[in-house]
Amino acid sequence: MARWLPRSTDLTRFCQKLNRVKTLEDDMMETSFNRCLSTIDLTLLGIGGMVGSGLYVLTGTVAKEIAGPAVIVSFIIAGFASLLAALCYAEFGARVPKTGSAYMFTYVSVGEIWAFLIGWNVLLEYMIGGAAVARAWSGYLDSIFNHKIKNFTETHVGAWQVPFLAHYPDFLAAAILLVATAFISFGAKVSSWLNHVFSAISMGVILFILIMGFVLAQPKNWSTQEGGFAPYGLSGIMAGTATCFYAFVGFDVIAASSEEARNPQRAVPRAIAFSLGLATGAYILVSVVLTLMVPWHTLDPDSALADAFYRRGYAWAGFLVAAGSICGEYRQRWEGTAHLPCLGGWEQSLFWSLPSSTCPSAMNTVLLSNLFSLPRIVYAMAEDGLFFQVFSRVHPRTQVPVVGIVVFGLLMALLALVFDLEALVQFLSIGTLLAYTFVAASIIVLRFQQQKGDVPAPVPSSQPNPEPHEGPSRGELKEYESFSDKLQLVDRDKSKEQREPGQLKAAFEPYLEFLSDFYPGEVVMVAVVTLMVSAICLCSILVFGNTHLHLPTWSYSLLLVLFSLGFLLSLLLIWAHEQQHSTQTFQIPLVPLSPALSIILNIYLMLKLSYMTWLRFAIWLLLGLLVYFGYGIWHSKENLREPRPQCVSARYVVFPGGSLEERVQTVQPSSQPATRLPDTDTDDCKR
């Protein structure tokens, strides 16, 4: 029976396949796409993905029910937390100007299977996001016509009472997605132009709100008579931060568009910084004017801005704001009418976790953002061989992945047509946070890896003329003639004043000498894994320790201290190694501290999600693993690049001292495992 068990060498080779990284081309600016997007184009794409429901719904809801006027502080903290993730995307987008966003960043640094799972979850995120916004668009238009569209469909087509399905087929939402798909297929320049138009309208509405809001501001609304600035204290501010964090999801569209940027090394970091800064500023300023216009405890969460203008006597201003509203029930008091229901409760919660918008023009930018990014991520996966090759085709005239645009546009339309998205929408949160986590970890791994030009060249052999069987026809086998050659090869790094990335810093070598024998970057990789495990355990204790686990105080405190120490020690161990400093592209500061903070924050927010979300997420991951092991692992381009096993010819001297002999063994060629060779000449290729 033992013969059916896999050998250790087979298991090692299988694990190496799962964790192989992508080989980048020498010229990363070469692409099948049209590099036509400027910094302004990318910035407006990012703003369109981020500026959304927070301006119309989220600000009022968090201010009244969670944080009060201190919602301003919540947005500031949430903006800082998003900045940590955004800086990681900015560094990768500049260094690896290829489409694929988090999928590509994970592939070039962590490994293939992790990259596939990230890409697999991002696909679902964009599909559900686009379908949800289309249904919201449909609900808005339906409310304008007094729900005649819904009534007509239910009368002539029928209503459904099936779990996970909508109450009726939403043909209008499907049609909206098909029209948007047609525009996206015309090319990146057309998509960018449309985004400019809708973004300009959206920013015009925001500017109008700010000007009118500051004119009507009353500082007394922050006074103690109205409850003060932070009526819910620090706990309310942090609870508001967790909610406000999702308002900034959407900047990854910039990284996904880096292969179509004219100068990605400069445009991508700048666009991410500008868009995140403008979005954060807009959220903060709107929160200020909203809580200064009327007392925070009198806000209407469903239509806070429109209701605030109406109550100050500016019905026309409230009408302009409410004319673009699609969330909740807004009161048309200026017409003396009753409530006009627009969207249900689940759709309100939907927009808490979506980068959507309540202004139709801004909502159009969200549709464009989803339909723009999704086919490009599919293209990147197909180009690498991990997804079906048909999606790697680029139209020769429009220079866009038209097959992916059409297919996934149709899938989005199908989701919006028949599915009730309430049960699926939380996928957006967990998928985004998982992508943020892996991108942050990838930054640490990549920063402590040797660059392509940093790999030491082999030391020339002392034998001037190799034997015929050792020439190029035999694969140019390297022959190590004497121990002095190998000693020079082993110790060449120590003779350098400048250490390579991934090596232990000279200042720490006397204290951590046992780590000097590892390959550069090997210790850092182990430390990153330990850091993530410690972060998961630490956040689990924080989230579940008192509620679900009911731990005693002493064990709760002890576990917090142990996992915090594990996290900090891993962080210090990473910092004790050399990292890449000489680069011409943007680099995130304070590595590894900044990515580590992003990791622990994202894990904490993921653990705050419901168990049903994790269950659905696990099912989706299982489906992804079936696709990967059924197709991706066999068609991966990296699988074709793997070198064939080669024979090694080596001649060396073995000394009785064990330490010297071990140092000899470490210089075996990388294509073969470091095995102990006989004391005499060997040449397996002759046999």
Image (tube, helix red, strand yellow):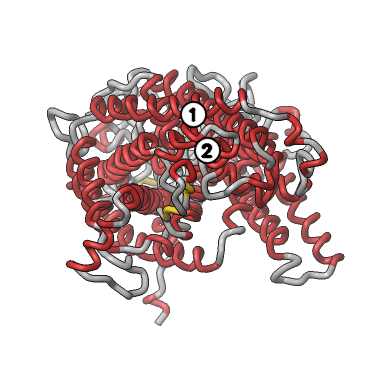
Side (left or right) of 382 relative to 201: left
Q: Is residue 617 above or below residue 177?
A: below
Q: Position of residue 241 (x, y in %)?
A: 64, 44
Q: Quadrant of the N terminus?
A: bottom left
Tell me which residue sits at (29%, 50%) in the image: 145
- Looking at the image, do the residues carrying marks 1 and 2 touch, with CB atoms under 8 Å apart? yes
Distance from label 1 to label 2 (Cα)?
Answer: 8 Å
Can you identify the residue that label 2 sits on?
55
Q: Residue 636 at what x, y percent from top left?
A: 29, 48
Task: Please rate how many residues cluster around mark 1, counting C-alpha atoms within 10 Å: few if below 14, some from 14 to 19, many from 20.
Answer: many
> Residue lying furthest bottom in this view?
1
- Front position in the image: 290 or 314: 314
Which image quarter: residue 213? top right
Which mark, residue 206? Answer: 1
Q: Is residue 224 left or right of residue 436?
A: right
Q: Amino acid at mark 2?
A: Leu
Res 534 label: none
Kindly identify the residue that appears in the image at 36 percent across and 34 percent down: 361
Report if residue 71 is visible in the image.
yes
Tag 1: residue type? Answer: Ile
| Depth order, front residue of 373/58 | 58
Towards the viewer: 380 or 262: 262
**How far across and how far down the image is residue 660, in percent?**
63, 41
**Viewer-proximal residue, 445 or 600?**
600
Mark 2: give few (<14), some (14-19) or many (20+) Cα within 10 Å: many
Residue 542 lies in quadrant: bottom right
Helix or strand or loop: what does disc 2 sit on?
Answer: helix
Asked if residue 232 lies left or right of residue 51, the reply is right
Mark found first going from the N terminus, 1 or 2? 2
Q: Residue at x 28, y 28 (%)?
A: 194
